[in-house]
Image (spheres, rainbow, N blue to C red):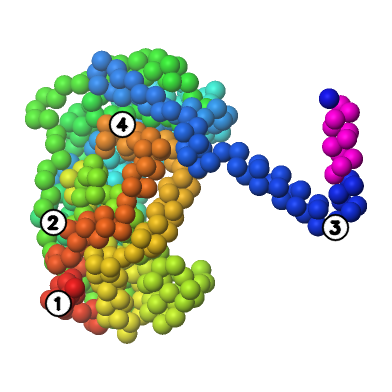
Amino acid sequence: MASGVIRAAGNVSRLLTKSPNARLHIVLGRRWRSAQAATHQEALVNVPETKVSKLPNGLRIATEDSGIPTATVGLWIDAGSRFENDKNNGTAHFLEHMAFKGTAKRSQMDLELEVENMGAHLNAYTSREQTVYYAKCFSKDIPKAVDILSDIIQNSTLGEQEIERERGVILREMQEVETNLQEVTFDYLHATAYQGTALGRTILGPTENIKSINRQDLVNYIKDHYKGPRMVLAAAGGVNHEELVTLAEKHFGNLSNTFEGEVPVAPPCRFTGSELRYREDDMPLAHVALAVEGPGWDNPDNIALMVASTLIGTWDRSHGGGSNLASALAAKCAKGNLCHSFQSFNTCYTDTGLWGMYFVTDKMNIEDMVFHIQNEWMKLCTNITEFEVQRAKNLLRTNMLLMLDGSTPVCEDIGRQMLCYGRRVPLPELDARINAITAKTVRDVCMNYIYDKCPAVAGVGPVEQLPDYNRIRSGMYWLRL
């Protein structure tokens, strides 16, 4: 065997001596073979499986073990601002702030020191339909992280002094949010699209509610919503599923699975085609969002709408690019200086969603930008090509895989999907569903959700040139297809 290797090496050396290009061919050949070691489909199949277990009280445990030395573990709770009313709007977010202010076992200082000494990160956030508490730590510290998570969920003291102190923190946070015009625009978009419903309210709540929320409001929210069947303990990274199930039984086994009153159900939220404008001519740029009603999480049309959203794309003039960009709208913006940035979005909730476009532009270009956006929307409904759809599908698959880079986004994906679908959708299945989308599928779905539909419109800033709503509505169809 050894002599064979030597002879092969001798042949290679003679080739290199004989032809200066031979080395290039050999090296390229080796690289090409190594690149073929695993195809895209094989790589998807090789992703660790998501294991799921369920406790008698309804709490679900879902994990993905990738064998790395760190892990992310967290609680995903089916409770957010959508489950509030006008009087207690902002309670879920207020409660998230109070979770780190001390428990019956740990003072706030003890909690912070314990987390810091582990080298861990403890965080939380609230959305319109979910509240999340999670920790990123070393794999060996998962038992401590689970203990801390269970403690802050079940044993928070909710002291009066801490409530008053945090009230001021939240009010300052509201002021900071008001300076983020993208956040403001999307809040206005929800307010007009879902006016009079729970989704039309903000996550932080109005100022008067923040000033009046008391300890009993927080206790009642925990009592009504923090139940076993509405929680998922998710983990990703270096995590052993059986060990996490044992930890869940120890720390969350006493969680109640019964409801004293009616079972909290997300109230239906109707979509209203309408507009909300906040005109302020002293602002340098206009922030505008246009959206139609999309489907809920579990609707199969979502895949086609995600492809359609990818076709429109995202663009920022600080990123460069010119008239040869793949997105037709981006190419027009780069060539004609129509806007500073734009991004398409597909926001989903349990039974409804918002599919549309957000852009930032000078006040004189608003009308042209709206025209070009609606023109691209009509193209999606009528004459999008297979080539364009294939490009968008490839980009969508790439973006989805890039978003799962790290234990924290994987853990978040697991928790969210377990609440929304009741399972973690395997990557090969998701890839197959994207691959099955054709140009006809995109045209049919867009015709159903976009063509001749009443949009919701929100504008902030110098929006005098934003077309009248009736003109925007008339741009949602073509007189001749």
Most frequent secondary structure within the magenta stretch: helix
Q: Which residue carries the number 4 mark?
A: 423
Pick whichever of labels 1 and 4 is earlier in the sequence. Answer: 4
* Quadrant that contains the C terminus: bottom left
Q: Amino acid at mark 3?
A: Pro
Q: Which region is colored magenta?
A: 2-12
Label 2 element class: loop
Query: Residue shown at 46%/70% (left/top)?
Result: 325
Q: Nearer the viewer, mark 2 or mark 3?
A: 3
Label 1 element class: loop
Q: Is residue 275 left or right of residue 157?
A: left
Q: Amino acid at mark 2?
A: Phe
Label 3 element class: loop
Marking on residue 271: 2
Residues packed near mark 3 inside 10 Å, few (<14), some (14 to 19) or many (20 plus): few
Q: Which residue carries the number 1 mark?
A: 479
Q: Nearer the viewer, mark 2 or mark 4?
A: 4
Location of residue 98 by image quarter:
top left
Q: Nearer the viewer, mark 1 or mark 2?
A: 1
* Quadrant that contains the N terminus: top right
Q: Is residue 248 left or right of residue 419?
A: right
Spatial CA distance of label 3 from label 1 is 65 Å
Marking on residue 20: 3
Pick whichever of labels 2 and 3 is earlier in the sequence. Answer: 3
